[in-house]
Image (cartoon, helix red, strand yellow):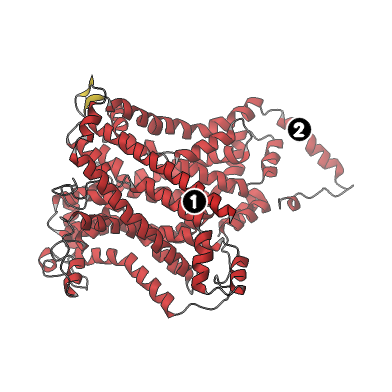
Amino acid sequence: MAVTDRVQPPPPTTKQQTSRDKSVKRLAFSHKVPKWDVKLSPYLYISPFFLLFAVTGLFPLAYTAWVSLHSWNLIGGKGAFTGLENYEFVLAQPFFWNAVGNTFSIFLLSSVPQVVLAIAIAAVLDANLRARTFWRMGVLVPFVVAPVAVGLIFNNLFADQAGLFNEMLTGIGLDPVRWHSDSLASHAAIATMVNFRWTGYNALIFLAAMQAIPRDVYEAATIDGAGRLRQFFSVTVPMLRPTIIFVVITATIGGLQIFDEARVFDQAGLGGADRQWQTLTMYIWELGWGQRNFGRASAVAWLLFLIIVLIAMANFLITRRIATQGGRR
Amino acid sequence: MSSIPMIEQTAGKGAARAAQRGLGTRRRGAPGGTQRRPGFLTYGFLGAVLLGSVFPLWWSFLVGSHDSSVISKGVPLIPGGNFLANASTVLDSIPFWKALGNSIIVSTVTAASVVLFSTLAGFAFAKLRFRGSKGLLVFVIATMAVPTQLGVVPLFIVMAKLGWTGSLWAVIIPGVVTAFGVFWMTQYLRDALPDELIEAVRIDGASMIQAFWYVGLPAARPAAAMLALFTFVATWTNFFWPFIVLDPSNPTLPVALQLLQAAHFVDYSIVLAGAVLSTIPLLILFAVAGRQLVSGIMQGAVKG
């Protein structure tokens, strides 16, 4: 550590008397600090997080399972124990499977293009730019726009009649898209909102990771005769792998719980007349607060929890496999 | 960074150097190892990206500055003169000022408490020796992957039991300390705060909490400022839980915006004027602290 130069040894003979006085004083002072302070303080300092996580994170999740085994009304409260009835009911609902499909569709449409585009933007930002801070700040502007506001703005841009995107499509001789009734089109519109808000943010993460790649790797590649494009695909992208995995995992956890943008895609907020863009979180809301059936809402919440855990585990296994392969090379 | 000299004074040269290392811009050339300036294509691509980032906001202002009769014929690309009229309709249809005040209260209190509790925990994890510290830190990191949003039903039941539904406490309390914050401060303090400094103040007779207050907190200031910023933005833009637990009469801004949409779903000029109004505070924050947001994201990426 570089701190040692700060500690200057006292000049040999001149001030010896005073410094000894001081050290005596210090020693006397330190006896006042009780031992429990040293032992207990760390636990005290970390306790707020653990308490809060237990009360607002862990307990509600566990209690969700309990609620899901009862008939439970928003107003009336707990009813009879019904076992797995809520699950049986929910799993037999076409709207449940519809929501599962919508959630995954929106998730894929938002995460895959987002990661690709973010890496491309990062590569460009990594160049020796003029006014680099300006460009970096520029791509981050959407991050400060609330998802609800993003949803409202894009809802207008994607309007079926006279929306800007449809005007542009008809302008170049294509048919207008029915963004608010066609299922896949609505997913693309909602995914665009997610991409709008997060691509720049992720580009900065990739940019930081790119700048951490040691330069001699590129020098070696240049000597081996690799061009810029080849360097990008053979050096930059493989070196970014851990960051890509990090971004994908965060995107998974957030993306499978998407609610805000889809909720405001029309004024009813239930995901369209035929639930074309109803996500699982929206379905939880509809069951719990729309139909006031907490039991069924909890069953869906718990199922979504299992889905996320499964995918996180799959992610982890794939990651480990990739990591070990990377090591072998 | 103006806080570097401050750290140097309060936490020593080593801390200042460590802080600088964390914050400093790495000057290096293009990946090819050449220093050449990129060409027209690069700037063209970046310009397009920038346009994509800013255009929706500009569009929102365009729509919000005309009245609905103009918009139905196609939105002109020049702002109209109707923004103030639309804005006043917004103020009439939703409790905008109340929502703004609530958003400020909720975001400020949450940011302050996240910083305090996260720095406290980060100080303990990074600098104090105690049994089980490693395992507990791993646990903290693991909780970041837990989708706690799925516990809304019981959380709502608990808040209803406490009589907190509709109150700002219901929104503030679940966010007063985050796993990300603890992790972030632990990472930062590990480098930025020399052990010798804590030992020195301990020998001087400082208690643990005094050591935290006089040495830990000053050393943590740059990272704490960034954590405060991110928490503020995240809390301000949060929708799902406030939407569930707050009443329409006492909303935060995103909740109020959704009410505006429900009230004026045909008239985009008013809805988007509201979207602009609700975004202005964070745009001001961005103008002041956007640089810190950028370097915060980039530091988090390297460490995380």
The answer to which image quadrant residue A70 occupies is top left
Q: Quick one: B218 or A195, which is closer to the camera? A: A195
Q: Would you say A199 lies left or right of A296 here?
A: right
Residue at image position (56%, 30%) is A43
Q: Secondary structure at mark 2?
A: helix
> Residue farthest to the top?
A80
Q: Is residue A98 visible?
A: yes
Chain of the residue under the numbered disc 1 shown in the image: B
Where residue A32 sits: x, y (%)?
69, 28
Q: Quadrant of the C terminus of chain A?
A: bottom right
Residue that numbered label 1 is attached to: B225
Which dot marks residue A27?
Answer: 2
Q: Would you say A22 lies left or right of B70 here?
A: right
Disc 2 from disc 1: Cα separation: 36 Å
Where residue B206 sits: x, y (%)?
65, 35
Q: Is residue A145 visible?
A: no
Q: Are marks 2 and 1 in contact (CB under 8 Å)?
A: no
Q: Is residue A178 above or below residue B112?
A: below
Amino acid type of the residue tagged 2 in the rendering: Leu
Residue at image position (32%, 34%) is A302
Q: Is residue A27 above or below residue B283?
A: above
Where residue A232 sits: x, y (%)?
50, 68
Q: Secondary structure at mark 1?
A: helix
- Does mark 1 fall on the same chain as mark 2? no
Which dot marks residue B15?
Answer: none
Tag nearer the camera, 2 or 1: 1
> Residue farthest to the left?
B69
Amino acid type of the residue tagged 1 in the rendering: Ala
Q: Quick one: A262 or A237, which is closer to the camera? A: A237
Instruction: Answer few, some or many: residues within 10 Å of disc 1's Cα (few below 14, many 20 plus, some between 14 and 19).
Output: some
